[in-house]
Amino acid sequence: MSYINIKNVWKEYGDQVVLERINSTVEEGEFITIVGASGCGKTTFLKMLLGTEAPSRGLITVANEPLRYEPDAQRGIVFQRYSVFPHMTVLQNVVLAREFEKSRFLSRLFGRARKQAIEEALTMIEAVGLSAAANKYPHELSGGMQQRLAIAQALIKKPRILLLDEPFGALDPGIRADMHQLVLELWRRYKLTIFMITHDLKEGFYLGTRLWVFDKDRIDPHHPGAFGARITYDVPVGSVDQKASEKIRESLQQHNAAQDEPELSGVSS
Amino acid sequence: MKKLINQHPTRPFRWLLGIIPFFILVILYIGASNARLAENPNDKLLPAFSSIAEAMNRLAFEPSKRSGEYVFWQDTISSLERLAVGVGVSALIALVLGVLNGTIPFVRANLSPLITAISLVPPMAILPILFIVFGLGEASKIVLIAIGITPFLIRDMQQRVLEIPGEQIIKAQTLGANTWQIIVRVVLPQVMPRLIASVRLSLGAAWLFLIAAEAIASTDGLGYRIFLVRRYLSMDVILPYVLWITLLAFAVDYALRQLSQWLYPWFHDQTPERA
């Protein structure tokens, strides 16, 4: 059995089919980037992995256990925005997970336990390159630094699975490249299984081990909701040949033509 | 020449512009008062500053012949005490119920309709009921303030809790937090500065209910005094009392703002406030 098994998963809202017949297996330590047109259900899929949405049909198992449809410490998450706590400093944001764990009622640590948690948090803060900002509040940080913080905060909990929902979508291209280095490094160091949604096809071709493309392969023009999206391409990163990448780009551009997606049109292989 | 909307007064000029209207009001008052007093030296409607000062001196710095108290200070203390207890109790109730309402859907489904209904009852209309139930003592005045502002505060708190981005709540869960931990570490600290802000907004209403209650049944207090001396047309007491109440209201508001800025710098840095 693989680490994560996705068996015939569907997601429907009323008669709107968002996802259909999703079948896949994922091994531990894989880094999957997910691309797809807007509204094709890739975020819905990530939400199912996160546990905030349940599939309408089908089953997802992690390590042979059915996935719990409630967010918990098994899966870490970094959203595009709003995933750090504005009322805590960088250090407090990272220490928080330990306080939740070791102090169920007060959720505050004292004395030696506190010292230990702070040390651990500082190591993690250093790993994401935020040491100089440890005592700053999030609003004093740039967008890239906030995302570094969000990653450090999630990783201190040592999740087996890390979910990234367009984590670098709001960042400048230069900073994005730094963040790619950081994520790749942390992925190797902590042996994470990563699912990352991105709008940037270049990221999909470059990061990780595996690229998934979500797309509708059947379309009923009279009833657009009749069919859902599936994983239309599942290719190992690095071995995407010219022909396949052309096809992927084409299929994405078809849907995005009307929506003006600059990230996709600017991509060159 | 820039357009009018783009022209800003310099700092000293802004102060001057702000003070001028007050200055004009004082001049107008003095003029009108002098004119009336010239016609009838016993006129009580617009007393001269000298008679206002005399009346205030009597109330603030000479013990009352009847009770031996310094009436003005006794009134001030009584009123502020009622206001503080009333607003404090309201804020505490609002914090607890607002946070529970905002975070726990079952509580919200259970309590929200009731709170909305209560908030629609005009508080002054049930003042007689309060007097009947709680008597004419302190309790009924405090309860009037509480009934007047608590529903607003609860609904505001609930709204503020619901405005916390869902991402944060999900993130906390992925960090291993249970419901209680999310409330005490994520929700409560973030709504505290917002509670202070809504208390500041509701202070106007709180003063209104306080003075109304004191006017109807009381033996001391700023509102009581104003309504008592109204019988003798004592404008020389009423005017300074009104001014004093205004000043107190401003001081309380200012103190709360400073407190909030001192306790929650992260909140005020990211939501700049036009004071």
Image (spheres, coloured by chain):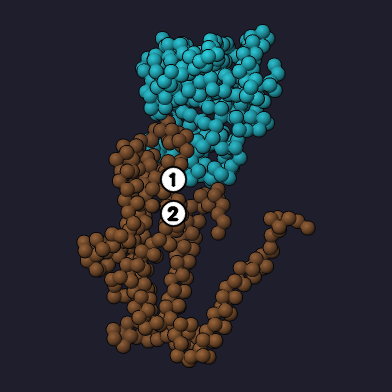
Chain colours: A cyan, B brown
Q: Is residue B256 above or below residue A5?
A: below
Looking at the picture, tell me which residue is in the foreground, A34 or A57. A57
What x and y, as percent, mark residue A9? 43, 14
Badge 2 or badge 1: first in the primary sequence: 1
What x and y, as percent, mark residue A252? 61, 16
Chain of residue at mark 2 = B
What x and y, as percent, mark residue B10? 69, 64
Instruction: Identify the residue under disc 1.
Output: B160
What x and y, as percent, mark residue A171? 62, 33
Name the residue at 46% across, 70% down: B246
**Which numbered circle lies on residue B198?**
2
Number of numbered discs overlaid on the protein picture: 2
Give the residue type at disc 1. Arg
Q: CA distance from mark 2 to mark 1?
A: 10 Å
Q: Is residue B79 above or below residue A137?
A: below
Res B103 seen here: yes
Do callouts 2 and 1 mark residues in contact (Cβ within 8 Å)?
yes
**Which numbered circle lies on residue A130?**
none
